[in-house]
Amino acid sequence: MATLKGKTLFITGASRGIGKAIAIRAARDGANVAIAAKTVEPHPRLPGTIHTAAKEIEEAGGKALPLQVDIRFEDQVQAAIAKTVETFGGLDVLVNNASAIFLAGTLETPMKRFDLMHGVNTRGTYVCSQAAIPHLEKSDNAHILNISPPLNMETRWFAPHVAYTMAKFGMSMCVLGMHEELRSKKIAVNALWPRTAVATAAVQNLLGGEEAMKGSRKPEIMADAAHEVLTRPSSEATGNFYIDDDVLKEAGVTDFDQYAVDPDAPLIPDFFL
């Protein structure tokens, strides 16, 4: 059975949601997980901190390294990657999960929101990848996985929230370029995106509250799909824009009700699919 036992993962935005779910799934194999996120004190609308996530990771059977990091700042990223390598002896996986979202049109998007989304999503992905690559190339199965959508250059994905779409597609463009750039180093670079809404704080707070949550799948579907991707040979599985349930179907999963928040509620399709 494919496993992440003994592997070291650096996951951005891993204090909650999809990032934390990926971390816990890896921990169940006995992986080492660096939690790179900003939250150290509880937030009223955003449950979870790097310390509560670390506790859950260790309870699941992994080793955790909570790191307070704002990935918009290169020095913080460099220090966090260095600390991870020093603590665990290397680096095998980078998951670029951290993301900022603001769904509004051009006139309604303050520039500070534009800058935040591009600073976290596109630039954050780039700077974390840049810092990780020298260590990943020493791994025997290195992966970079960006939680970002397929590159569908259609007007309908841009018009309602062009700033957000540009920032998310920036993450996907990193996949498009880096997978070929890093092929000779045997570092796989892929994207993973959900088929449906996923029950996270963003859905709860921005996309419709409890009703939207009912039509969502649990973050564990992304965690199981990420696990499947990250255990594939890096020399073979690279340059893909994976969709979570496609990955799991290919792996033999047939019961998707297990991932539904409410199996009786119709699922809400994701933005970009």
Image (tube, rainbow, N blue to C red):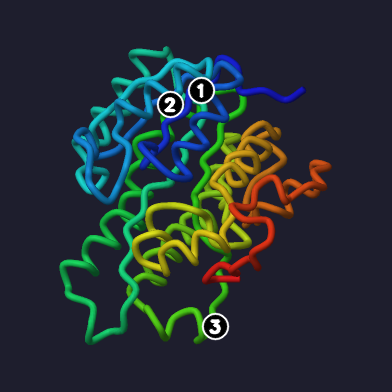
Number of numbered markers: 3
Residue 65 shows which numbered tag?
A: none
Q: Disc 3 and disc 2: Cα gap in Å? A: 37 Å
Residue 70 sits above or below residue 147 on the image: above
Badge 1 is on which residue? 138
State which quadrant residue 81 falls in. top left
Picture quarter with the N terminus: top right
Q: What residue type is labelled 3?
A: Glu
Query: Mark 3 Cα within 10 Å, few/some/many (few <14, many 20+)?
Result: few
Please report whichever mark, 3 or 2, sits nearer to the chain's N-terminal start. Answer: 2
Query: Spatial distance from mark 1 to mark 2, Cα to Cα?
Result: 6 Å
Kind of element beneath mark 3:
loop
Q: Residue 20: x percent and y percent?
A: 45, 36
Task: Check residue 154 in the rendering and tell me which mark sits there, or answer none.
Answer: 3
Location of residue 263 (image quadrant): bottom right
Proximity of marks 1 and 2: CB atoms separated by less than 8 Å: yes
Residue appearing at x 33%, y 14% in the figure: 86
Amino acid beneath label 2 = His
The answer to which quarter of the image holds residue 246 is: bottom right
Q: Where is residue 75 in the image (x, y as percent from the top left)?
A: 19, 36
Comparing 135 with 27, the one in front is 27
Closer-to-camera residue (220/117): 220
Q: Label 1, label 3: how many angstroms apart (C-alpha)?
A: 39 Å
Q: Mark 1 vs mark 3: give the one in front.
A: 3
Q: Residue 135 carries which label?
A: 2
Q: In this view, does 242 lie to the left or right of 151?
A: right
Query: Residue placed at 60% from the left, 17% from the top?
Result: 5
SS at circle 1: loop
- Label 2 secondary element: helix
